[in-house]
Image (tube, rainbow, N blue to C red):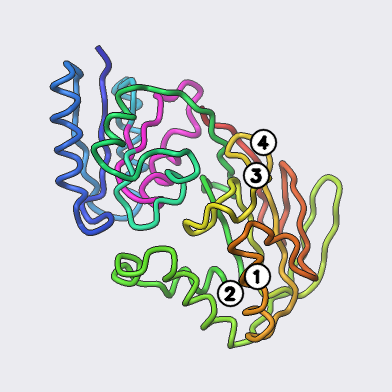
Amino acid sequence: MDRYAVIYNPHSGQDHGESVGKKIEQALVKNQQTVELMPTKGPKDATRLAKKAAQAQFDIVVAVGGDGTINEVVSGLATLEQPPYLGIVPAGTVNNLARVLQIPLDIDQAIENLQQGHLQPLDVGQINDDYLISTMTLGILADAALNVTQSEKQKWGPLAFLNEGIRVLAKHQHYPLTIETPHRHWQKDTQFLLVTLTNSVGGFTKFNPEAQPDDGYFHVFVAPKMSLMRSAMFLPYFLTGNFKKIPGMTYFKADKITIARFIIKLAKYF
């Protein structure tokens, strides 16, 4: 018999987090497992609850929600020498990491997948004292992500980020960056920097076919300056998995990166 701690955001996706948490509890109890529900109450609460679950020696900590909730749960487990196993039931809007790991987006199927217990390694990035499970951006992509509201994500899904990104591009902002890796030095103005651990960004799963969730690398994209018209011409590259082939795009991979005063290193979570 395994002990499950189910951490869920009551407001994930279409505000169905509470009902999803209870559905998971019912399925696990029916399967004679021990379950404790742990709803979050605010930002970073999932990190605190994950640490609490580990200290209580739960076997499996289940993150229920979107990528933000999963990231917080992983942040609570990543520093531990022998963390509990991580389970994921996607109940967010975009569910980027779940798509990467091929976890069913249907809740009933995801719960069934959880109980089957297939193990898969997962890279986790560390950014100073914070952790990264999927994607980090600087520049206009970060601005776009911050500007997308929860209601827009619920209504449009991944297209909400694409729409806002096009709007922000029109402002022609650029940012001076210095990037260092063990084998590379890069210094130039850019409109955005994108660091990803997987083949998916914002729910677009063909973004970088070369990347795997456990390949041990950050995949780094540094964009050239782009006008709105030029960026529209590059949209097919984005949608077909040829993003790094955009003319002027700098792409490389590394297991450690220094960006200005930010130091990024790679950790591995199983």
Residue at the image position 54 percent from the left and 29 percent from the top: 121
Q: Name above or below for residue 97 compared with residue 169.
A: above
Residue at the image position 17 percent from the left and 28 percent from the top: 27
Tell which circle, 3 or 4, labels the residue nearer the N-terminal end.
3
Tell which circle, 2 or 3, labels the residue nearer the N-terminal end.
2
Tell which circle, 1 or 3, labels the residue nearer the N-terminal end.
1
Q: Mark 3 is on which residue type? A: Ala
Q: Name the residue under label 2.
A: 140
Is 87 inside the magenta-drawn segment?
yes
Q: Mark 1 is on which residue type? A: Phe
Residue contact between numbered discs 3 and 4, judged by CB atoms under 8 Å: no
Magenta residue span = 62-88
Tell which circle, 4 or 2, labels the residue nearer the N-terminal end.
2
Q: Where is residue 24 in the image (x, y as percent from the top left)?
A: 20, 34
At label 1, counting other C-alpha atoms closer than 10 Å, the crowd grade (few under 14, some 14-19, many 20 or more) is: many
Q: Mark 1 points at which residue?
A: 192
Q: Is mark 1 on a helix, strand or loop?
A: strand
Q: Name the residue under label 3.
A: 211
